[in-house]
Image (cartoon, coloured by chain):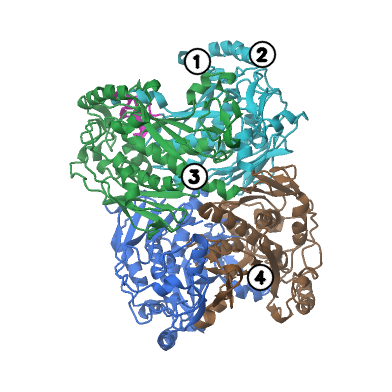
Chain colours: A cyan, B green, C brown, D blue
Amino acid sequence: MSFNTFGRAFRFTTWGESHGPALGVVIDGCPPGLELSEAKIQPFLDARRPGQSKYTTQRKEPDQVKILSGIFEGKTTGTPISLMIENVDQRSKDYSDVAKAYRPGHADYTYDAKYGFRDYRGGGRSSARETAARVAAGAVARLVVPEVSFAAYVCEIGGDAVDRGNFDSDEISRNPFFCPDAEAAKRWEQLVDDARKAGSSLGAVVECIASGVPAGWGAPVYAKMDSELAAAMMSINATKGVEIGDGFAAARLRGEENADAMRPGKGGSPEFLANHAGGTAGGIATGQPLVCRVAFKPTSSILTPVETITKDGEPAEIVTKGRHDPCVGIRGTPVVEAMMALVLADQKLLHRAQCG
Amino acid sequence: MSFNTFGRAFRFTTWGESHGPALGVVIDGCPPGLELSEAKIQPFLDARRPGQSKYTTQRKEPDQVKILSGIFEGKTTGTPISLMIENVDQRSKDYSDVAKAYRPGHADYTYDAKYGFRDYRGGGRSSARETAARVAAGAVARLVVPEVSFAAYVCEIGGDAVDRGNFDSDEISRNPFFCPDAEAAKRWEQLVDDARKAGSSLGAVVECIASGVPAGWGAPVYAKMDSELAAAMMSINATKGVEIGDGFAAARLRGEENADAMRPGKGGSPEFLANHAGGTAGGIATGQPLVCRVAFKPTSSILTPVETITKDGEPAEIVTKGRHDPCVGIRGTPVVEAMMALVLADQKLLHRAQCG
Amino acid sequence: MSFNTFGRAFRFTTWGESHGPALGVVIDGCPPGLELSEAKIQPFLDARRPGQSKYTTQRKEPDQVKILSGIFEGKTTGTPISLMIENVDQRSKDYSDVAKAYRPGHADYTYDAKYGFRDYRGGGRSSARETAARVAAGAVARLVVPEVSFAAYVCEIGGDAVDRGNFDSDEISRNPFFCPDAEAAKRWEQLVDDARKAGSSLGAVVECIASGVPAGWGAPVYAKMDSELAAAMMSINATKGVEIGDGFAAARLRGEENADAMRPGKGGSPEFLANHAGGTAGGIATGQPLVCRVAFKPTSSILTPVETITKDGEPAEIVTKGRHDPCVGIRGTPVVEAMMALVLADQKLLHRAQCG
Amino acid sequence: MSFNTFGRAFRFTTWGESHGPALGVVIDGCPPGLELSEAKIQPFLDARRPGQSKYTTQRKEPDQVKILSGIFEGKTTGTPISLMIENVDQRSKDYSDVAKAYRPGHADYTYDAKYGFRDYRGGGRSSARETAARVAAGAVARLVVPEVSFAAYVCEIGGDAVDRGNFDSDEISRNPFFCPDAEAAKRWEQLVDDARKAGSSLGAVVECIASGVPAGWGAPVYAKMDSELAAAMMSINATKGVEIGDGFAAARLRGEENADAMRPGKGGSPEFLANHAGGTAGGIATGQPLVCRVAFKPTSSILTPVETITKDGEPAEIVTKGRHDPCVGIRGTPVVEAMMALVLADQKLLHRAQCG
């Protein structure tokens, strides 16, 4: 069944297709009295916006957000906040290839298997344009958790990782890759451009850190902070893996290496001597930075011909022309950050529901 | 907020602590008319049961399940199925150490931060005994999806991985590690026993494959098959990472390497030439085997003294005595399989709700 | 907490305020392949539209619906259907009275108590304009349950009830009161006009009958058909009571009078000799017509001055000028019908989720 | 689909059949630190317990509650609270009549229509024994809302109403009818006994008042206080109608009669001059007493033979022998009170989630 709503207390519902008139999101459960205007949302959309460098898709979308409800005199009222973004650059191209044959790695075949037919124009609902709505919602979520600061960045493209010794958070916004390592960013220019020119594509790993999350947010068992973050991240287009803290590397450590020892810290909070756990224990925030890492597969749209079948089960070959991101993980970075903000806004409200 | 329910259509709610009188699960939304008895559940609990080899905890729990409701004349009635497992071996030991000081990596500190106090006996609700209830529920879920077959196994312990060339599914139940590679199982005997004797612990990676999932199950956006599986797996105790298909390795592939090409297959279904995607595209099952991999951190309970603080913020050192799994990932294997069955039972019902 | 979503499988989320730029609804979980266009929704909105007779508010709203997503080539795709209705006639009047003092019976005081402030223009989110979104969603819900036919009508205004002997379903659309009794409709012209001219208002009772609901839809315990209908109806503005079947009158019957005896009927279904139960038993549909009755209080906006207090707690007197329905129950009729369709669409999908 | 869970933040899930070994409830989301023991729950179960007078069923059930989880050192821990009540007096009678033919007014036919078969022993899941679990949960809910006091009572049996002039809340616990009017209680002895002896049954109206609910609890639109209460009440066995405040009588008032005028009151809160609204406006509590009224139909189990059909569609006649309440509304009274407490506990947590 289609579930286009995420969250339990701070909830949002997205709608819209790649080539429809608009897309949007309705946010429900937002606390009242928060100062909100389009100007507070737009910068986050701008960061995700396509067509800003040759390393991303050339589709030109202004992604201008409009607030349609839930605000009065510049403040959230506690009622649903409806945000809309009009689609502008739905190039009227010939979709007969995609209509007929299934692009491997895309949702073409599976939508048909599920629904019997599909909106094939630009991928319809399966297009990553849906993530613009998440980024808009994420900008609202951030207002709910002013105590938290977020940093998302690409830490690996096509297997080429950043050097953590070069980490500079100021660098993230200075290059077109959300890369915190100036040297890696330099290398990636060539790497991504080569892939683009070859009609190929690259995968990426995105990391997001949330600092300032109070110890106690989160929950045991099926709403563990880890579980909610994993669900959030794996709902983003093209993601295939998620880790909290050391993640898969923790499976290679011994117990004594993996222990995050504690000492008395300031203000009654413990000082942790390590953060292998990535800021959670038993599903609940420890007060350390939350660390989440997400794997993006290479964009499935490539110019190399791939063997496939048609709707009618005939053999075919397909080449995905059109405007595509050579590395979808790059523009996935603001989306990862938005999803983390959305999870934390929800967790904050849930925590105070139960614990006051 | 505490959320002890998982699922949307096929839903289950677990309850119980490590040292309470019992633990259990209530399953709601189960289709009527399925043949069910304790005998259909017990083998799965037995597979997860502690104390069966020296490689797992020595706590002796028979884990006998009782069906308290939802069955009439040997069949599910469509009303809630209540399953209960009594705790038998809650050794009355001295918990004063754990009551006073926080064990790093455990939920001791975070439960106190969230709830103000905690049931410190055996970890209370944060104990992995909760997973017995999931395994019991999973046995019911399997009846809902008879078209699907499951295989979960450990593919890596302490960084020592199986050789996929040696894969033999019959081997999984022949060794105490759920290991599909007889040679690796041999090596792990020494590896795990050494860790146990040293009072240390090891992490593990568990893989689960579900075959027979029809194309079309799953959903776009926030109930993606990938997203539901990720949430399910990351809600299991000690998990820190989850992958679908190639997972993080996909982030290192190029688009043309990662494409799962299709050919006309039998019965109208496509024949796929690869399964990098792990059986999903756009969040919906492709009909290929679903492949999910889960990282378990090393057990946090170790005999090596670790620096920590007391409830009152004083410095302390803690050693976790008692009966513990040297590698919690081993007994996590039946839990991973159960969670996959629970997700698929839910997805099957959700699919037919929307698509008939 | 704000919950602007209704339904479990067929779900909809409404948004918008009386004086914002627009209002709308996002429908999620709708089955694919249903023929849908604006033309299939508009007639239901037209039935609820204000300003059509002197017996309803004079606000002029065309209530033109736009479909923004979820449709391809004239059919639902299974993805969210976003519907939008622009507000046109938000007369820029002086709201300083309402901004300062609380109108008794309105949500003015309670919104302030809950949220700390409120959008006072036309009642903001508490305005019955929200129900236009429900009516639009209801038009889609009807497509999901083509086996069901609906008839909603006013059976009582200001204590003056229809004569059931005069019941004529064709009459309902012939008068401005949705009245199935031509004689009562005649009387109500005077009754409602007198109230309007006096600056007073009247309550009403609306009845809705759904025929063709298959035996088996609905569920035991907390999703009883009765319970879902009650929740749906009591979420409509100005409702204060709901009955299924004989309702409160059943409390005055003896067991043998209330029994709906059965005889063998056609096609294996029973023939019922009465329908005191209103089409449900144990929360599940019997196959008889579902009968639901809803009480609407008199419109709270009246020209008679009422004692009240200001935002600052000072004594005041208030008169609600502006354009109001003298009997809000009249235009509530299409809303009741829409909510019944929405509940049944949900119940149909839920039934097939569990029972196939 | 079966939904045996109620609530959004304070949630409970019930399970169990009339003739199974036990029934119970799992409460999730309960705040931590509340003092709870069996002794705090038992008195409420005792009030609902059958067999205490000749006016209720003669089934003898001690209804002893056991707490299986969620409590440590006498306090709620914030984790699920599992409560169990064993069934003791499942008289082993001959159910062949009920197994074969459908009792009109019962869920026999509809369960078969939905699920294909049913547990016919004592009505299975459709038995009002399920309400014992609600009463137990309600006792926990009361601890969450210590600021609220509750009074539920029968105000009408078989059409014979109490005289509100005789209202004495102390009287409620002094007679076997939960009747606040000593004179009516006197009359009802004869009335109910006559019905019992005649093998007939009577309906009833139960009213519940919650005092001390702070202004601001509740929510606009689909989680209106009115809507949640209506859903809660209409999920109780044998209920057919629900009213808030004046309910259906409000539909006969004029706007000026129905207005709850306000004056400056103590402590900044308004003093209301009437409470036609029953304590809500726009779905949100006004701070006045919440007033809810519920119609119970006469017990469907009667000794008068009723025409019916068998499972195979053959004509038959049925008489419901066995132990039954001649007026199920009487023992419904503690259930109504419990449901009101459960709704308010949920609303309190939801309010502080959104509004802090």
Mark sitting earlier along the chain (3/2): 2
Chain holding disc 3: A
Q: Chain of mark 2?
A: A
Q: Secondary structure at mark 3?
A: helix
* SS class, disc 2: helix
Q: Residues within 10 Å of mark 4 (few under 14, many from 20)?
A: many
Image disc number at residue C207: 4
- Dot 3 or dot 1: first in sequence order is 1
Q: CA distance from mark 4 to mark 2?
A: 67 Å
Question: Do labels 1 and 4 touch, CB within 8 Å?
Answer: no
Q: Which residues are magenta?
A: A256-277
Q: Mark 4 and mark 3: span between their CA atoms?
A: 39 Å
Rendered position, C220 above or below B245: below
Residue denoted by label 3: A349
The residue under label 1 is which amino acid type? Val
**Quadrant of res B192:** top left
Seen at 68% across and 65% down, the residue is C150
Q: Residue furthest front?
A: B266
Looking at the rendered image, the disc whose residue lies closer to the viewer, 4 or 2, is 2
Q: Which residue is mark 1?
A: A162
